[in-house]
Image: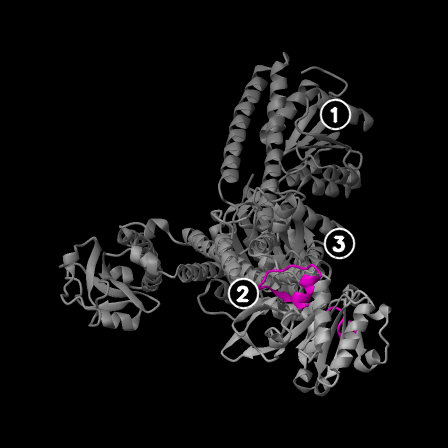
C-alpha cells in the first residue's frame, strides 16, 4: 500500500491501527468464548431466524397429539390404543411428554417395542439454574421404558430458542427426551451440548392430530408413517406460552410445540451448528483481514459508507449461512470486530493526518519565518550593532546609545554606543518605571531630555529619548544627541527617528520570539511539555500576521505606484486598481469595476475585441509580455504603453504545463506614460535631422572644394580660397559634431532641464493652432509670416510653448473685434527673432513695464504668465521687448539664440 | 577663365554660407559663367533692383526670409518671370521640393552635389531660358 505523504513526512513503520487491530482480534476471540458473546449471538439468531424463508423449512418428521391436562389419567387406555395405532401405521416412535398411568400389558409391550419413550417432566431447580427437579413419577413406575427429561432450556433474552441434549435432574445426568429420541434414530451429539432449534416454517409447519381425531380412528399411514409422534398435555401449567422466533412478532408456542420443533431439528439433522473456537478464530481472522485491507486505502470521509456496505455483506453472509448451511456465523463477534477495526483504523489514520497537518504547520511556519525574518538580525548576537548601523545610515546624529531591558526586570542596561561611551549616560537608576524612561514610554515619541547624556563642552547639542516597544512589551530604549543646527528647520529628523524606532522594535520582538522558540526546541522539558500543534499554530499565525503586514505594504505600494496599474483575476474581474489608474480612467469616464479586462483594453487601445482577446491569450497561455501603444485624452492627449502580462505562482517541476498555465491566475495591466519619452525622442530626432542638414551643407562645401582642387585650371588665388574653405568647414563640422555628442549624450531634454536645442518654429505653430478657435470666435485674424525652416534655439520645449501661448493670449485679450494679430519669424545674426503685434487697445508703456517687471502682485492671468515667460527667457539668454501704446496695440519682439 | 557659350551669362548665387558661395562662384567662373553673390534674401532682392541675372542659384534656408519666400516675392514681379531659379538645398524632404517647384523654382538639387552635375544643370537652365 502506498502512502502519498507530503511535506517530508516519514512513511509509517506500521500500517495505521495494525497492532491494535491484532490485539482487538485476540480480545474479541476470547470474548466469543464467554456467555456474553453467546447471548449477543442469540439475539442476532432470533432476528435472523425470524426472516428465514419458508422454502428452507425442514421436513416435518414429528407429529403432535395433545391431551387435556385434566383428562390425562382418564385416557390412559385410549393413549395406549393411540400408541399402538400410530406404531402400527408406520410411526417411528412415540414420545409421551409426561408419564401417564399405563397398564402393565402396555408397559410390557412398549418396553419390548423399543419405540416408546416416556418423558419425565422436570422444572428448574431454584437452587441453581442449571439443575432440574423431576416432577413426574414415571421413573419409579415403569423403569423399563426409556425415560427422557422433558424440560425447556433457559431462555435467551426472553426467547426459547435452544435445547440441551442432557441435564442434571435430581442429581443425575439424564438425556432430554428429544435427544433420547434422536439417538434412537441414529443422531449422536455431545452429551452436554446445547443446540439451537430450527423454527423455520413456524407453527403452521408442525403436523398435528387432535386427540378426538385419533380416537375416532383417523390415524392413517399418510399422517403418521415415518414420523415421531409426540403426545403431550395441554392446558394447566403446560398452557404457559413460550416465545420463540417465528416472525417479526415473536410467536408464542406451547412447550409441546417447543419439544416437537427441537426433536424435528435433531431428526432432520438441521440443528444450527456453531463453529468451534478455532474455526471461529479463523473466521474472525478472515474478517479482520477484510476490514483492515478495505479501510486502509479508504479516505476518512468514505469510511462510514464503506463500513455500512461491509456490514450489509456479512449480514447477508450470515443469513445465507443460516438458511442454507444451518451454520451460525459468530455475528456478534464479527460486528464487535468490525467496530473495533473501524475505530482503530479511523483513529490511527486521524492521528497520521494530524501528524501530517502538524508537520505541515511547522514546516509552513518555518518557511514563512525564513522568508519574513531577517536571519542576519534574528540569529546574530550582534543585533544591536545592526540596529545602530541602521540608525547611523539613516540619520545624522551626534551620538547614540541603546539600552536593553533586563529580562524579567524593570531595569535597563546600556548595550551599545556610537560616537560616545556607554558611561556617558548621566543617569544611574536605569529603572524604566521612573523618569525619563517612563515619560518616554508615555509619550511613545521622541522625548527631549536634559542632560540624560553628559554634556560635551563647546557642543550645542539637543538630546532625545525613544522607547523600543512592541505590542505593549518594553524591549529597550535609545537615546541620541543631535547638533542643534541640524535640528533647526528639520523637524523631519525626529519623525524619521520615531519611524526607525518602530522598525527596530518590530525586529527586536521578532528576534525575541524566534529565540524563545529555538530555546523551547532545545529544552527536553520544553519539548516534552510543549503542545507542538499549538506552538506550530502560534508560529504560523504569527508568520501569517507578518505576511499580511507585508501584503498590506505591497498593496499600499501597488496603490501608490506612479504607473497606472490594474490587476485582474483569471476570470477577468478586477482585483486591485491603484490610485493612478483610477484617476486616469475617471478622466476618460471609464469605470474599471463594471468592465472586464477585455472591455477595458478594448476601450483604451481602440482595438477590436478579437485582437484584445488574442493579446490576453498570448499573455496568459504563452507567457508573453504584450506591449501596446495607445493615446489617452482628447484635449491634451498623452502617449501610453499598455503592458499586459500574466503573473502568479510558477508551477513546480512535477506539475504539468497546463498547471503552469493555470497558476498564472492574475493579469496585470499597466499604463506607462511614455509622453515624456516620446517628447524627448521627438526632440532628438528633430535635432538629428537638423544636424544632418548642417552636415550636408558642410559636406557640400568640402566635396566641391575637393573636386576643385583636382581641377588643373584652378588658379593659385582660387586654390587658397578653396583650402581656406576646407579648413573652415572641417572646423565647423567638428564643432557641430562635438556639440551634437554633448547634447545627445547628456540629460538635456528632461522636463526639469531649461536649456536645450528646440524647434521654436514648431512650438510657435502649435501655440497659434491652440488659440485659433478662440480667435475665430472673436473674429480676430491671425496673420503669419513664418519660414519653412529655422535654426533651433536654446530653450525648454515645454516653456517656450507656454511663452508663445502667454504672448498670444495676452494679444488676443487686447485685440479689437475684426482686428489682427500678426506674427513673423526670421533668423538673423544667429538669433531667431519672433515678432508679435496686434490691432488692439494697448496700455501705457509705463504700466506695461510695471506689470511685467514690477514686484507688485497682479491679478491678470495673462500678465502672470508673461512674468513667468520673462523668467524663462532670461534663463535662455533671450530677450523680450514689449511695446504697448494706448490705441496702437502691443508689440512683442522675442529674440532667442540660434544654435544648429 | 575660358570663353564659352555662357561667357555673357550672369548667375546670382544666394546662400548665407559665404564659403560655399565662393566655391560655387569659382566653379561657375571656371566654366566661363559670371557670378554675383548675395547672402540673404533681402540682399538678393536689393541686387535685383540694378542687375538682371540670367539665372538664380538659391539656397533654401536663408536668414530673414527663406528660399520659398524669396521665390514667392520674385515671382510677384513679372520682370523676373524669365529668370530660372535653381534651388540648392541640403534638406531632403520631398514635400519641400514640391513646394519650391510649385512656387516657381526651375530645378532642385540636393547638397552635396558633384560639380559636373551642377554645371550640367546650370548649362541646361541657361540654354532653356536664354
Quarter of the C terminus of chain A within the rendering = top right
* Residue topped by disc 1: B122
- Residue A320: quadrant of the picture: bottom right
x then y, percent, for residue B26: 64, 22
State whether residue A264 appears in this view: yes
Q: Are marks 3 and 1 on the same chain?
A: no
In the shown orientation, is residue A292 left or right of residue A424? right
Relative horizontal placement of residue A113, taking residue A350 as reference (left or right): right
Given residues A74 and A163, the one toward you in this image is: A74
Residue A794 in the image: state x and y as whole percent: 52, 46
Question: Which picture quadrant has residue A108?
Answer: bottom right
Q: Secondary structure at mark 1?
A: helix
Q: CA distance from mark 3 to mark 2?
A: 50 Å
Labels 2, 1: front one: 2
Chain bearing tag 1 is: B
Disc 3/disc 1 C-alpha distance (Å) = 60 Å
Disc 3 crowd rating (10 Å Cα; few below 14, some 14-19, many 20+) is some
- Magenta segment boundaries in residue numbering: A178-205
Q: Out of A368 and A824, give the one closest to the viewer.
A: A368
| Residue at 50% in and 66% down | A851
The residue at the point 77 percent across, 37 percent down is B101
Badge 1 crowding class, 10 Å Cα cut-off, few under 14, some 14 to 19, many 20 or more, is many
Classify mark 3: helix, strand or loop. Answer: helix
Above or below, A357 against A78 in this view is above
| Left or right, A74 with reference to A542 | right
Residue topped by disc 3: A609
Question: Is A137 rendered above or below residue A497?
Answer: below
What residue sits right under mark 2 in the picture? A863
Can residue A815 be seen at all in this image of the molecule? no
SS for callout 2: helix
Of the image marks 3 and 2, the number of the one nearer the N terminus: 3
Amino acid at each position: 500500500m502506498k502512502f502519498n505523504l507530503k511535506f517530508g513526512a516519514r512513511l509509517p513503520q506500521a500500517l495505521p491501527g495494525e497492532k491494535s487491530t491484532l490485539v482487538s482480534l485476540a480480545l474479541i476471540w476470547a470474548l466469543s468464548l464467554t456467555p456474553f458473546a453467546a447471548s449477543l449471538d442469540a439475539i442476532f439468531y432470533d432476528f435472523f431466524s425470524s426472516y428465514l424463508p419458508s422454502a428452507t423449512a425442514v421436513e416435518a418428521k414429528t407429529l403432535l397429539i395433545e391431551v387435556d391436562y385434566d383428562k390425562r389419567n382418564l385416557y390412559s387406555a385410549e393413549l395406549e390404543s393411540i400408541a399402538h395405532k400410530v406404531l402400527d401405521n408406520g410411526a417411528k416412535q412415540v414420545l409421551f411428554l409426561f408419564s401417564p398411568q399405563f397398564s402393565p400389558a402396555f408397559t410390557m409391550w412398549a418396553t419390548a417395542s423399543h419405540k416408546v419413550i416416556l418423558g419425565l417432566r422436570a422444572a428448574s431447580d431454584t437452587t441453581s439454574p442449571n439443575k432440574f427437579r423431576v416432577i413426574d413419577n414415571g421413573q419409579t413406575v415403569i423403569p423399563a421404558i426409556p425415560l427422557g427429561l422433558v424440560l425447556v432450556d433457559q431462555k435467551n433474552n426472553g426467547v426459547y430458542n435452544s435445547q440441551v441434549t442432557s441435564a442434571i435432574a435430581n442429581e443425575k445426568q439424564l438425556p432430554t427426551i428429544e435427544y433420547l429420541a434422536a439417538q434412537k434414530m441414529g443422531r449422536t451429539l455431545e452429551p452436554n451440548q446445547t443446540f439451537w432449534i430450527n423454527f423455520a416454517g413456524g407453527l403452521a409447519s408442525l403436523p398435528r392430530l387432535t386427540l378426538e381425531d385419533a380416537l375416532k380412528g383417523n390415524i392413517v399411514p399418510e399422517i403418521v408413517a415415518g414420523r415421531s409422534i409426540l403426545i403431550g398435555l395441554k392446558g394447566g401449567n403446560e398452557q404457559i406460552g413460550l416465545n420463540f422466533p417465528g416472525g417479526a412478532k415473536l410467536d408464542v408456542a406451547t412447550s409441546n410445540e417447543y419439544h416437537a420443533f427441537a426433536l424435528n431439528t435433531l431428526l432432520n439433522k438441521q440443528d444450527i451448528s456453531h463453529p468451534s473456537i478455532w474455526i471461529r478464530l479463523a473466521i474472525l481472522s478472515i474478517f479482520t483481514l477484510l476490514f483492515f485491507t478495505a479501510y486502509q486505502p479508504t479516505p476518512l470521509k468514505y469510511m462510514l459508507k464503506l463500513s455500512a456496505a461491509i456490514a450489509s455483506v456479512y449480514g447477508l453472509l450470515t443469513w445465507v449461512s443460516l438458511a442454507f448451511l444451518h451454520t451460525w456465523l459468530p455475528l456478534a463477534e464479527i460486528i464487535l470486530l468490525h467496530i473495533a477495526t473501524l475505530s482503530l483504523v479511523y483513529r490511527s489514520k486521524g492521528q497520521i493526518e494530524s501528524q501530517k497537518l502538524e508537520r505541515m504547520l511547522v514546516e509552513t511556519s518555518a518557511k514563512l519565518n525564513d522568508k519574513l525574518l531577517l536571519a542576519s538580525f534574528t540569529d546574530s548576537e550582534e543585533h544591536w550593532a545592526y540596529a545602530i548601523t541602521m540608525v547611523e545610515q539613516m540619520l545624522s546624529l551626534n551620538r547614540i546609545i541603546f539600552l536593553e531591558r533586563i529580562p524579567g526586570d524593570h531595569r535597563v542596561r546600556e548595550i551599545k554606543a556610537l560616537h560616545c561611551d556607554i558611561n556617558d549616560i548621566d543617569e544611574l537608576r536605569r529603572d524604566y518605571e521612573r523618569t525619563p524612561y517612563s515619560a518616554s514610554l508615555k509619550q511613545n515619541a521622541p522625548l527631549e531630555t536634559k542632560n540624560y547624556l553628559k554634556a560635551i563642552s563647546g557642543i550645542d547639542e539637543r538630546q532625545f529619548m525613544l522607547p523600543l516597544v512592541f505590542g505593549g512589551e518594553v524591549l529597550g530604549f535609545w537615546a541620541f544627541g543631535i547638533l542643534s543646527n541640524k535640528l533647526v528647520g528639520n523637524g523631519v529628523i525626529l519623525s524619521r527617528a520615531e519611524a526607525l524606532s518602530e522598525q527596530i522594535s518590530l525586529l527586536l520582538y521578532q528576534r525575541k520570539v524566534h529565540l524563545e522558540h529555538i530555546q523551547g526546541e532545545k529544552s527536553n522539558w520544553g519539548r516534552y511539555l510543549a503542545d507542538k500543534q499549538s506552538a506550530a499554530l502560534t508560529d504560523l499565525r504569527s508568520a501569517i500576521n507578518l505576511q499580511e503586514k507585508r501584503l498590506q505594504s505591497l498593496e499600499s505600494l501597488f496603490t501608490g505606484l506612479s504607473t497606472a496599474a490594474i490587476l485582474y483575476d483569471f476570470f477577468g474581474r478586477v482585483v486591485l486598481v491603484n490610485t493612478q489608474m483610477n484617476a486616469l480612467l475617471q478622466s476618460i469616464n471609464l469605470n474599471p469595476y463594471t468592465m472586464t479586462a477585455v472591455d477595458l483594453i478594448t476601450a483604451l487601445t481602440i482595438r477590436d475585441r478579437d485582437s484584445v482577446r488574442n493579446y490576453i491569450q498570448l499573455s496568459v497561455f504563452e507567457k508573453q509580455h504584450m506591449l501596446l501603444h495607445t493615446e489617452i485624452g482628447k484635449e491634451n492627449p498623452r502617449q501610453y504603453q499598455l503592458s499586459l502580462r500574466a503573473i502568479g505562482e510558477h508551477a513546480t517541476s512535477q506539475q504539468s504545463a497546463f498547471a503552469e498555465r493555470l497558476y498564472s491566475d492574475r493579469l496585470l495591466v499597466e499604463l506607462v506614460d511614455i509622453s515624456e519619452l516620446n517628447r524627448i525622442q521627438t526632440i532628438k530626432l528633430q535635432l538629428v535631422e537638423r544636424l544632418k542638414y548642417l552636415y550636408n551643407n558642410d559636406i557640400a562645401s568640402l566635396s566641391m572644394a575637393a573636386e576643385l582642387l583636382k581641377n588643373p585650371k584652378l588658379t593659385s588665388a582660387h586654390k587658397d580660397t578653396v583650402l581656406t574653405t576646407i579648413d573652415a568647414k572641417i572646423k565647423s563640422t567638428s564643432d557641430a559634431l562635438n556639440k551634437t555628442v554633448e547634447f545627445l549624450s547628456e540629460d538635456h531634454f528632461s522636463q526639469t532641464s531649461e536649456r536645450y536645442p528646440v524647434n521654436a518654429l514648431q512650438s510657435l505653430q502649435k501655440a497659434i493652432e491652440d488659440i485659433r478657435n478662440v480667435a475665430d470666435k472673436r473674429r480676430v485674424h491671425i496673420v503669419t509670416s513664418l519660414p519653412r525652416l529655422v535654426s533651433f534655439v536654446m530653450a525648454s520645449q515645454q516653456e517656450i510653448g507656454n511663452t508663445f501661448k502667454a504672448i498670444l493670449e495676452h494679444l488676443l485679450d487686447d485685440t479689437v473685434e475684426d482686428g489682427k494679430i500678426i506674427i513673423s519669424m526670421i533668423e538673423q545674426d544667429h538669433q531667431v527673432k519672433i515678432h508679435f503685434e496686434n490691432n488692439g487697445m494697448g496700455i501705457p508703456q509705463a504700466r506695461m513695464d510695471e506689470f511685467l517687471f514690477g514686484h507688485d502682485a497682479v491679478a491678470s492671468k495673462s500678465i502672470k504668465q508673461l512674468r513667468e515667460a520673462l523668467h524663462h527667457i532670461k534663463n535662455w539668454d533671450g530677450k523680450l521687448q514689449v511695446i504697448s501704446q494706448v490705441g496702437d496695440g502691443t508689440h512683442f519682439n522675442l529674440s532667442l539664440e540660434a544654435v544648429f | 577663365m575660358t570663353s564659352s557659350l555662357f561667357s555673357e551669362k550672369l548667375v546670382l548665387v544666394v546662400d548665407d554660407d559665404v564659403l560655399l558661395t565662393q566655391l560655387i562662384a569659382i566653379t561657375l567662373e571656371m566654366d566661363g559663367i559670371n557670378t554675383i553673390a548675395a547672402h540673404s534674401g533681402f540682399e538678393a532682392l536689393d541686387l535685383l533692383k540694378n542687375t538682371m541675372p540670367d539665372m538664380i542659384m538659391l539656397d533654401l534656408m536663408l536668414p530673414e526670409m527663406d528660399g520659398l519666400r524669396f521665390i514667392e516675392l520674385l515671382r510677384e514681379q513679372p520682370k523676373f518671370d524669365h529668370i530660372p531659379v535653381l534651388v540648392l538645398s541640403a534638406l531632403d524632404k520631398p514635400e519641400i521640393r514640391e513646394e519650391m517647384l510649385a512656387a516657381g523654382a526651375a530645378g532642385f538639387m540636393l547638397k552635396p552635389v558633384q560639380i559636373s552635375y551642377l554645371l550640367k544643370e546650370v548649362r541646361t537652365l541657361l540654354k532653356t531660358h536664354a
